[in-house]
Amino acid sequence: MKINLIIFDLDGTLVNTSVDIMNALNYAIAPYGLDQLNVARTISMVGEGVSTLISRLLGQSGAELKSEVLKRFLDYYSVHLNDFSFPYPGVRETLEVLGGYRKTVISNKRTDLSRRLLENLGLAGYFDFIWGSDSVPEKKPSPVPVLEMLKKVGCTFDEAVIVGDSNFDIEAGRAAGVRTVAVSYGFRDASFLKDADFIINSMTELPSMLEVFNAS
C-alpha cells in the first residue's frame, strides 16, 4: 500500500543536538562531583528521554538528587536549546520535496522542547504534528506513540513509515507494524540499526526509498 505518513525521530535524525544536550547535562551535574561528559558519551546515552538519562548518570547512589539535577538540566536547556544545534545536511531540502506526504515527529524529548527547537530552526512548519515524551503515556521503544499517531492522522500501519537513528525508533515501528528506515549518520552505531527495513546514509536518500516502498 502507498505510503501516506512519514514519522520522524528528532534528535540524531532531523537535528544534531549533541553539543547543546552535552552542555546542559554538564551544567546540571557540575555541583555534584560527577565527571563532565564529552559528545561521544552524551550521544551514547541519549534516546530514552532526559529523566532516564539523568537516572543513569547519577546511579543508585545519587538517586535522591534526580529531581534537582533534572530541574537544573531543564532550566539550562530551555534557554540554550539551539545554541549549537543544526539540521543535518539534506534535511530541509528533503522535507521540501516531500510535500505530498503527511509528516509528523515523535521524539522522546519533551513536547514543548521538541516544538520550540523545530520552530527556532525553521522546521516546525513541515510537520502536521510534533509529539514528545509527554504527548502519550508511553515513550519509544513502546509502539504506543506510533499507534496513537496513526489514529491521530487517520492512517493504517501499512501506509506509514518511521525514520530514526536508533534501535528505539526501529523497535517502536516494528512493534506497531509500520515500515522502518534507519539513518546511519545519527547518534547510534550501525550495529543498533540492523533490524530496520532499510538504512540510508543521508536524508536525501529518503524520497527514492519511499518510491521503493510505494512500488512494492
Image (cartoon, rainbow, N blue to C red):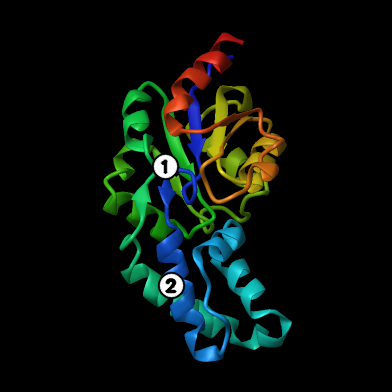
Quadrant hosting residue 54? bottom right
The quadrant in which the C terminus is found is top right
Please state which of residues 114 and 46 is positioned toward the viewer in this rendering: 46
Dot 2 amino acid type? Ala
Q: What element carries label 1?
A: strand
Residue 27 in picture, x, y percent from top left = 44, 79
Q: Which quadrant of the figure has residue 117?
A: bottom left
Q: Few, some or many C-alpha atoms within 10 Å of disc 1 (few <14, some 14-19, many ≥20)? A: some
Residue at 51% x, 42% y: name it.
Answer: 185
Residue 143 visible in image: no
Question: Is residue 144 or residue 61 the one in the foreground?
Answer: 61
Residue 59 to residue 156: above or below: below
Q: Which residue is drawn at 58% across and 84% down?
A: 34
Q: Mark 2 points at which residue?
A: 24
Which quadrant is home to the N terminus? top right
Q: Where is residue 59 in the image (x, y as percent from the top left)?
A: 69, 79
Q: Which residue sits at x=51%, y=77%?
A: 70
Q: In this view, does 151 lie above or below 166?
A: above
Q: Which residue lies furthest to the top in this view?
A: 215
> How would you rate the neighbour count of disc 2 (Cα within 10 Å): few for under 14, some for 14-19, many for 20 or more?
many
- Which is nearer the N-term, disc 1 or disc 2? 2
Q: Compared to 153, does 32 lie above or below?
A: below
Q: Nearer the viewer, residue 36 or 197?
A: 36
Secondary structure type for disc 2: helix
- Is residue 206 visible in the rendered image? The answer is yes
Q: Name the residue under label 1.
A: 129
Name above or below for residue 138 compared with residue 62: above
Which of the two marks, 1 or 2, is nearer to us in this view? Answer: 2
Q: Is residue 99 left or right of residue 142?
A: left
